[in-house]
Image: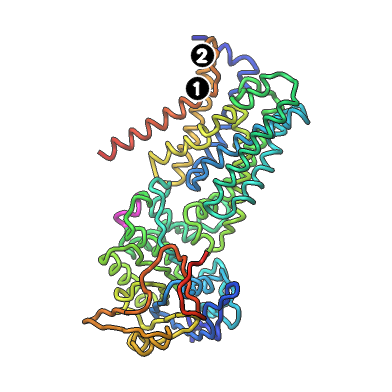
Amino acid sequence: MSPAAVELRGASLRRGDRLLWHDLDLEIAAGEFVAILGPNGAGKSTLLKVLLGLLPLSSGTALVAGRTPRRGSADVGYVPQQKGFDTDLGARGRDLVTLGIDGHRFGPLRTPGRAQRVQRAIDAVGASAYAGRPIGRLSGGEQQRLRIAQALVGDPAVLLCDEPLLSLDLNHQRGVVELLDRRRREAGTAVLMVTHEINPVLPFVDRVVYLVDGRVAVGAPDEVLTSDRLSSLYGTRIDVLRMRDRIVVLGAETEPHHDHDHFHDQNTGEWHRDE
Amino acid sequence: MSDIWTYLHFPFAQHALIAATLVALVSGLIAPFVAARDMAFAVHGSAELAFPTAVAGLLVFDDALTGALLGSVLVAVAIALLGQRRGEGNTAIGVILAFGLGLGVFLLSFYHGYASQATNILFGSIVAVTGRDLAVLATVAAVVSLLVLAIYRPLFFSSVDPEVAEARGVPVRALGLLFVLMLTVTVTEVAQVVGTLLVLSLAITPAAAARRWTAAPLLVTGLSVLFALVAADGGFLLSLAFVDSGVKASVFITFISFGLYLVARAAGAVRKV
């Protein structure tokens, strides 16, 4: 049997004197779609950084496709938080995807078969109509599809996405989530997505990982996203309301902050500015 | 109008034309990265900082170019160390720049050679290029060109998409340092021809114009080199044609460079209509 796409055992992460999360046990199978939820500063993006091999765990073990996370591993595709590109950046959508194949290689030689692989990746995300246009002049949704094509062009076992739905309208949010869902079904790519937007992903995800104040809840959305479970996770009264197929979490900070300048003090239960 | 062809038989004019070509080649290669990394101020800063180091070169070696090239390494290290965090860079460059210019004026008060040596640093002196200068320029051009060829892809990756590049194993910070070094050395070279005050016309404008024509990275680089060559060589030849006017070649170079940029903008606007 092939190894789990992602495996965390007793994983803890400390940054400075702050314990972001601890004793995290998580095993994600090939083709699983997992959403990582929680308030700002809970260490969601940091979890992705660990799996990318950019940060070491403070304790415990992490494995990606059976191997210790290593920077530059071909097992992992990464879609970073949407920043947008300069309008006049001298690069087309196609060039961004191409960098996913050999952007890390030195020397002038091209990888054989590069153009065909890039075209297949572009077709797979439905971006062929605008892949030749300057990347800085595309809409947020179009840029996001090309970023996903870039992350997938190397056929990774695991796809890590950091807030891929941020600043997209509902239509594009739905398009991106369906795209990821199709990929994990057809190619068996495990997808981990950090997101503040619960509802667009809810119909598709197998499990959610909810991080609050160093505590972690893992399970199917229906198990984790309940008033009782979240109240005990936050240590305060949280109400989860269900309206048709939508969920509203009341009492928890769920709105995205783009600047990430707040963190939650686990001793006093207050929000502070983080300098 | 004087006969350009007659002038081109003189060694000074041949040297100048070769120097203009070498300088245009490297600055055209570097310029797209300067634009993509938004480092115009770093260019300006390291160009003006070639002034104090060139004066120091005059004092110590009696040669401005040696001083400026050695100094550019110092400048690169200072820019890289003080401005490591993104967004902090421009402030750091401003601080070093202010001090450096003061230092240059201070050093100049100890220099009692030809006054024109000092103004040449600021406004360029393409006709004063010696055979030894050419050897230095050619070496720098060869090294920078080979480096660009070797690191083109990872440098492009870390310029347009630093976060993913980092995750993919590109040594983003080391490449950034190397690029600042290549930049300051190139800028020092360009300053020999157009002067420290007019460097941007070869190290930024060609790429700015090229990006208006295309977004294909290799084509941007090719056009940028072409525009830099047209501006540098064309500017020098024009200065020969109008030699009686006494206008320096660097002036024609900046005018042609800006003209190419205006044409590119106009063409871009027309295509959109």
Q: Is residue A130 magenta?
A: yes
Which stretch did the figure color magenta? A128-133
Across and down, in percent, residue A168 comes to 31, 63
Nearer to the camera, A49 or A116: A49
- In the image, residue B94 lies at what x, y percent? 58, 42
Dot 1 falls on a residue whose secondary structure is: helix
Residue A273 percent location from the top left of the image: 48, 67
User: Looking at the picture, do discs 2 and 1 lie on one chain?
Assistant: yes
Point out the image quarter for the C terminus of chain B.
top left
Q: Which mark is residue B252?
A: 1
Question: How far apart, in angstroms, are the residues tagged by discs 2 and 1?
Answer: 11 Å
Q: Earlier in the sequence, mark 2 or mark 1?
A: 2
Q: Which residue is mark 2?
A: B241
Q: Which of the two residues, A116 or B241, is positioned nearer the viewer here?
A: B241
> Which chain does the numbered disc 2 sit on?
B
Magenta region includes residue B77: no
Indicate whether A267 appears above or below B104.
below
Q: Main secondary structure of the magenta part?
A: loop
